[in-house]
Each structure stands twice: as C-alpha cells, then as structure tokens.
Amino acid sequence: MTAAISAKVLERFPAGSPRGSWPAEEYAARRRAEGEAATVVMDLESDAFLVVVPADGD
C-alpha cells in the first residue's frame, strides 16, 4: 500500500557525506529544537536526504 503525504522540503543533503557525518539528521534536530516537526527522508531518485515538515494545511 502506498500513501501520499504532503510535505515541504526545508533542505537537501547529498547522500555521500563522509562516514560518521549526519548533516541532515543534525539539521532536522536543530529544527525540532525550534519547534518544527522536521524529519529526514531519503529521495532515491536524487540520492539525497531531504529534511521535510508537514505542508501547510495538514
């Protein structure tokens, strides 16, 4: 089953970061500390991690 979720992309990070480096997770953690419901998802087509929040109206 596939579910469509509407989200706003805040930032993109290439998947090839150095070992032990988690820039997308660190960015999302800072946004969550500021009160945003940020999460990290993988965009397989672009080979990038996206930090997203729910789109307005959700």
Image (cartoon, rainbow, N blue to C red):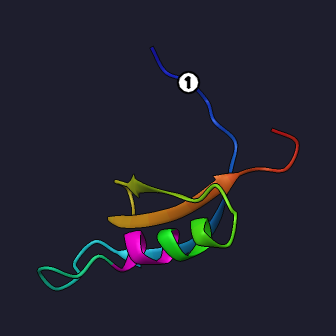
Pointer 1: residues within 10 angstroms few (<14), some, or many (20+)? Answer: few
Say what secondary structure mark 1 lies in.
loop
Q: Quadrant of the C terminus?
A: top right
Give the residue at x 76% y 50%. Answer: 55
* Type of amino acid at the residue the image marks with label 1: Ala
Rendering coords of residue 17 (x, y %): 23, 82
Q: Quadrant of the N terminus?
A: top left
Determine which residue is flagged by label 1: 3
Give the residue at x 70% y 64%. Answer: 35
Give the residue at x 52% y 65%. Answer: 51
Depth order, front residue of 37/46? 37
The range drawn in magenta is: 23-28
Work out whether 44 lies above or below 9: above
Rendering coords of residue 40 (x, y %): 45, 58
Count how many numbered circles sit on residues in the image: 1
Work out whether 3 lies above or below 57: above
Depth order, front residue of 38/32? 32
Depth order, front residue of 45/23? 23
Q: Quadrant of residue 4?
A: top right
Q: Quadrant of residue 46?
A: bottom left
Please give left or right for residue 49 compared with residue 56 in the image: left
**Residue 25 lies within the magenta run:** yes
Work out whether 15 lies above or below 42: below
